[in-house]
Image (cartoon, rainbow, N blue to C red):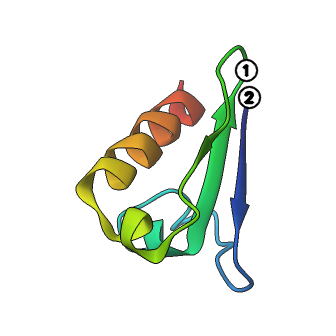
């Protein structure tokens, strides 16, 4: 299971946790893992955050 926190308008299953919406998602966690947050705009714009979201998107796909 994966949970995410995002800004208004950031929810669409087709785009969920993709690089296109990474700047709108500020928190994510998966079962058994700690919550990961990107509270600053600069954090959400970085490659590291896109990688975090991709890892969680992959967990949703399995």
Give left or right: position of 19 versus 9.
left
Name which of mark 1 and mark 2 comes first in the sequence.
2
Q: Which residue is mark 2?
A: 1
Q: Secondary structure at mark 2?
A: loop
Q: Residue at x 50, y 42 (%)?
A: 57
Q: On the image, which quarter does residue 25 sit in?
A: bottom right
Q: Which residue is mark 1?
A: 31
Q: Nearest the camera: 56 or 40?
A: 40
* Helix, strand or loop status at disc 1: loop
Where in the figure is residue 15, as x and y percent of width and height? Answer: 51, 68
Label 1: few (<14), some (14–19) or many (≥20) C-alpha neighbours in 10 Å = few
Q: In the figure, 2 relative to 11: above or below?
A: above
Cβ atoms under marks 1 and 2 closer than 8 Å: yes
Residue depicted at 59% across the width and 34% down the height: 60
On screen, residue 33 above or below 18: above
Query: In the rendered view, does 17 fall on the left or right side of 49?
Result: right
Question: Farthest residue in the bottom direction?
Answer: 9
Q: Residue 9 location, x and y as percent?
A: 69, 85
Which residue occupies 66% across, 25% down? 34
Left or right of 17 in this view: 27: right
Mark 2: give few (<14), some (14-19) or many (20+) Cα within 10 Å: few
- Give the foreground label among 1 and 2: 1
Quadrant in which the N terminus appears: top right
Task: Quadrant for residue 22, please give it.
Answer: bottom left
Name the image quarter holding the C terminus.
top right
């Amino acid at each position: 299971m994966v949970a995410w926190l995002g800004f208004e308008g950031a929810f669409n299953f087709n785009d969920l946790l993709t690089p296109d919406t990474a700047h709108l998602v500020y928190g994510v966690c998966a079962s058994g893992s700690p919550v990961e947050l990107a509270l600053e705009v600069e954090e959400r714009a970085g490659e590291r955050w896109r990688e975090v979201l991709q890892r969680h998107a992959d967990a949703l796909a399995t």
